Image (cartoon, rainbow, N blue to C red):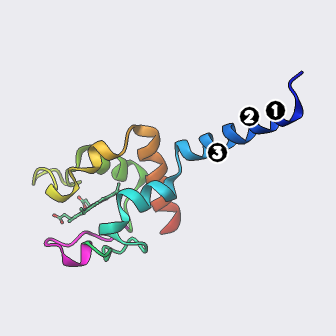
Amino acid sequence: MLPKKVALFLATVLYFSNAHAADGAKLYSEACASCHGDKMDGNGPIGAALKPKPKSLKGYTVAQLIQVMKTAKKIDGDKGEIALMVGIKSQLKNDEERKAVADYIVSKLK
Ligand code: HEC
């Protein structure tokens, strides 16, 4: 048997590392909010000064959001990469993180 304190410590570490692994809210605020804004309306502190302006994220499906995060390309596909969003391709490490962000956006804007 593990001493109680050690077991409690391990449980805490596991709980927090799991929560961290795909924390959509945290990832959104780190990777998207500066441009798309806390309200996801395209009016983040950096976004306000950009041309073209970042879009409101309302109306996109989880699959579309994941696709944009993965490719930094527009949904309609005909204009190449969105230069300002190229950085998010490397900022989000894997599909689990991209899905967490997309789920978070869709749940917030319902
Ligand atoms: C450095 C600023 C910046 C960051 C950071 C950023 N975006 Fe964007 N995003 C933009 C701009 C600018 C556009 C609009 C480009 C255009 O209209 O040509 C855009 C457009 C989009 C679109 C619309 C694409 C389409 O085809 O309609 C989606 C969806 C999107 N961003 C999602 C995200 C998500 C999710 C994140 C975080 C993981 C993110 N963006 C981070 C600047 C940013």
Q: Residue furthest top?
A: 1
Q: Is residue 102 left or right of residue 71?
A: right
Residue drawn at (32%, 46%), measured in percent from left and top? 91
Question: Horizontal and vertical percent for residue 109?
Answer: 47, 69
* Looking at the image, residue 48 lies above or below residue 65: below
Q: Check disc 3 and give the amino acid type.
A: Phe
Extent of the magenta region = 47-57
Q: Check disc 1 and give the amino acid type.
A: Ala
Question: Horizontal and vertical percent for residue 48?
Answer: 24, 78
Earlier residue among tags 3 and 2? 2
Q: Which residue is mark 1?
A: 7
Q: Callout 1: 10 Å neighbours few (<14), some, many (20+)? A: few
**Alpha-carbon span between mark 1 and mark 3:** 14 Å
Q: Which residue is mark 2?
A: 10
Residue drawn at (86%, 25%), measured in percent from left and top? 2
**Label 2–label 1 contact, CB within 8 A:** yes
**Alpha-carbon span between mark 2 and mark 1:** 5 Å
Ligand 1: image quarter: bottom left
- Quadrant of res 4: top right
Q: Is residue 15 left or right of residue 83?
A: right
- Quadrant of res 32: bottom left
Q: Which residue is mark 3?
A: 16
Q: Is residue 53 magenta?
A: yes
Q: Check disc 2 and give the amino acid type.
A: Leu
Q: Is residue 44 left or right of residue 6?
A: left
Q: Is residue 88 magenta?
A: no
Q: Callout 2: 10 Å neighbours few (<14), some, many (20+)? A: few
**Label 1–label 3 contact, CB within 8 A:** no
Whether residue 78 is visible, yes or no, is yes
